[in-house]
Image (tube, rainbow, N blue to C red):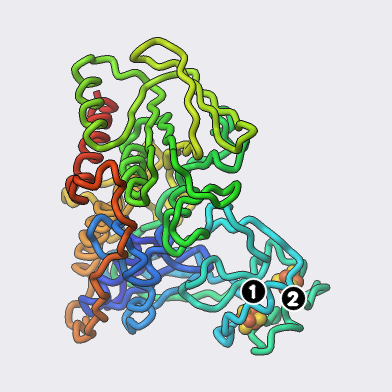
């Protein structure tokens, strides 16, 4: 038996599992297929003040603490290639692709201006642009920049027609002669799979107006705007002209648990930012009168307008606002309203590459495409293969709080497969400061409602809709 756990995926669940294992004295080897850790919450992990309340009161692992934890090894641009053995003694093989930028990089940014290749920055939901050599965000772990070799004009090691970045790098950090692949082999006692989730393709929302105007956003794009540090410093300004919106409509097409959870969270964040009018349009009918009345009552209390309707259409106006029309189910009339920003709420899907990961690890997937949970020990994190556990959204969409809870459970189960005499729980984790980012003053219309009460009301409101979705 060994003292090590392999964790596949470095989003909030994977990193939380890693810190749990490391703090218990185990060695956590984290494999991330992207160039930096943090997943969709990476911006929340730069410092405690960037967290806001998006982790629902639970602290997320911070880059500083992760980088300083000697029990955690992070391998980025890497995939699990094979796994052999049994619980307590798996031999795993990990293939790491070249970064082409070494840790001599000082993040001076000189290469950014020199590189001629421009691509949308996936880490900003495509709202900003990056070069072929880039850092996805202002602060990342690891800190050195990376070359997206698929976009780069060079094809190492033989075809290197472009040297612009190498020529300007005074720190000699860029090397196209590094090995293209490095294979790492480790013996681990257990594996935790935390590859996260995939957001619905934006293209499937063109019928609802996506792409017709920059201020018609997907919920993932709004989330990136709302994050500090994000492209706008954490404020939901309009992509078209950076003006602050006075009115925002969130359109909910699919009433899944996750979509409702995202809407509840974003409504709260927009109200916190003093957006005067926040409205939700549900594109399906609430058939029971009593339920409808209850939803409207809660909506009034929370300062949020909720409508249900169909035949939704959004058109840009010459004044750079958005004219929205729909048939209101409550009146059976065509309604026309104007908003500064319209947000289309997307749902989530199993992460890309999950079928390959399932094949590599020998686990079963459910019909939904997510990882199937074995009911054998009732912990909610065991897969069909003993010694392999799942954390976070890879077994189905869940909230951040539930992701963190599942990571804790998976880490506990994984630790039970290790040689306890080899653990070194003498490592003292760094204490992250607990203070949260101060938000703007509450909206005048709801200034008399305490913050916690306002949030509770919004959640109540949306969970009322959620119950409807279950019916
Ligand atoms: S790779 Fe070189 S030029 Fe680019 S940011 Fe790093 S040190 Fe600066
Ligand atoms: S080699 Fe050229 S294209 Fe490639 S990252 Fe450097 S500057 Fe950009």
Q: Is residue 338 visible?
A: yes
- Residue 266, percent from left and from top: 36, 45
Picture quadrant of residue 193: bottom left
Q: In the picture shown, does residue 287 fall above or below 362?
A: above
Left or right of residue 166: residue 106:
left
Question: Which residue lies most toward the top here?
Answer: 332
Reading the chain from its start, which is encountered first: label 2 or label 1?
A: 2
Is the residue marked 1 within 8 Å of ligand 2, measured from its CB?
no
Q: Nearer the viewer, residue 252 or 470?
A: 252
Q: Quadrant of the N terminus?
A: bottom left
Q: Is residue 390 visible?
A: no
- Residue 448, percent from left and from top: 19, 46
Q: Quadrant of the C terminus?
A: top left
Mark sitting on residue 157:
2
- Residue 340, percent from left and from top: 50, 39
Q: Residue at x 64, y 74 (%)?
A: 180
Cβ atoms at labels 2 and 1 below 8 Å apart: yes
Crowding at mark 2 (Cα within 10 Å: few <14, some 14-19, many 20+): few
Picture quadrant of residue 370: top left
Question: Tag 2's secondary structure?
Answer: loop
Q: Quadrant of ligand 1?
A: bottom right
Mark sitting on residue 431:
none
* Residue underneath mark 1: 180
Q: Residue at x 31, y 41 (%)?
A: 264
Is the residue marked 2 within 8 Å of ligand 2, measured from its CB?
no
Q: In the picture shown, does residue 226 fall above or below 306?
A: below
Q: Nearer the viewer, residue 290 or 347?
A: 290
Q: Residue at x 55, y 33 (%)?
A: 322
Q: In the picture shown, does residue 346 fall above or below 338?
A: below
How far is mark 2 from mark 1, CA to CA? 8 Å
Question: Tag 1's secondary structure?
Answer: loop
Left or right of residue 36: residue 126:
right
């Amino acid at each position: 038996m060994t003292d090590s756990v392999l964790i596949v995926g470095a989003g909030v669940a994977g990193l939380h599992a890693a810190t749990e294992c490391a703090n218990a004295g185990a060695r956590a080897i984290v494999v991330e297929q992207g160039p930096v850790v943090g997943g969709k919450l990476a911006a929340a992990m730069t410092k405690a003040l960037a967290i806001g309340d998006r982790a629902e009161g639970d602290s997320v692992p911070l880059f500083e603490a992760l980088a300083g934890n000697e029990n955690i090894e992070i391998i980025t641009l890497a995939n699990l290639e094979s796994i052999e053995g049994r619980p307590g003694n798996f031999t795993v093989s990990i293939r790491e692709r070249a970064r082409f930028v070494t840790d001599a990089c000082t993040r001076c940014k000189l290469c950014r201006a020199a590189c001629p290749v421009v691509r949308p920055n996936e880490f900003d939901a495509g709202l900003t642009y990056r070069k072929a050599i880039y850092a996805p965000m202002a602060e990342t772990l690891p800190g050195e920049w990376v070359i997206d070799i698929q976009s780069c004009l060079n094809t190492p090691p033989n075809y290197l027609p472009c040297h612009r970045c190498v020529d300007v790098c005074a720190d000699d950090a860029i090397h196209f002669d590094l090995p293209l692949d490095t294979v790492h082999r480790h013996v681990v006692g257990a594996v935790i799979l935390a590859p996260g989730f995939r957001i619905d393709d934006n293209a499937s929302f063109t019928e609802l107006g996506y792409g017709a105007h920059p201020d018609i956003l997907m919920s993932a794009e709004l989330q990136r705007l709302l994050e500090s540090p994000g492209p706008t410093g954490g404020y939901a300004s309009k992509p078209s002209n950076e003006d602050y919106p006075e009115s925002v409509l969130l359109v909910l097409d699919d009433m899944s648990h996750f979509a409702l959870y995202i809407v509840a969270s974003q409504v709260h964040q927009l109200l916190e930012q003093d957006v005067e009018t926040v409205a939700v349009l549900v594109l399906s009918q609430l058939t029971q009168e009593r339920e409808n009345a209850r939803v409207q009552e809660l909506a009034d209390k929370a300062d949020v307008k909720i409508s249900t309707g169909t035949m939704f259409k959004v058109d840009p106006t010459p004044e750079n606002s958005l004219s929205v029309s729909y048939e209101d189910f409550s009146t059976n009339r065509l309604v026309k309203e104007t908003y500064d920003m319209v947000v289309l709420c997307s749902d989530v899907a199993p992460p890309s590459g999950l079928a390959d990961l399932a094949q590599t690890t020998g686990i079963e997937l459910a019909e939904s495409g997510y990882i199937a949970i074995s009911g054998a020990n009732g912990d909610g994190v065991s897969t069909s293969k003993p010694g392999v556990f799942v954390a976070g959204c890879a077994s189905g969409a869940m909230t951040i709080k539930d992701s963190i809870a599942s990571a804790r459970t998976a880490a506990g189960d994984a630790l039970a497969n290790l040689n306890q005499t080899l653990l070194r729980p003498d490592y003292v984790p760094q204490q992250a400061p607990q203070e949260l980012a101060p938000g703007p003053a509450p909206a005048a219309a709801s200034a008399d409602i305490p913050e916690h009460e306002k949030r509770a009301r919004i959640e109540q409101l949306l969970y009322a809709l959620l119950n409807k979705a279950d019916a």
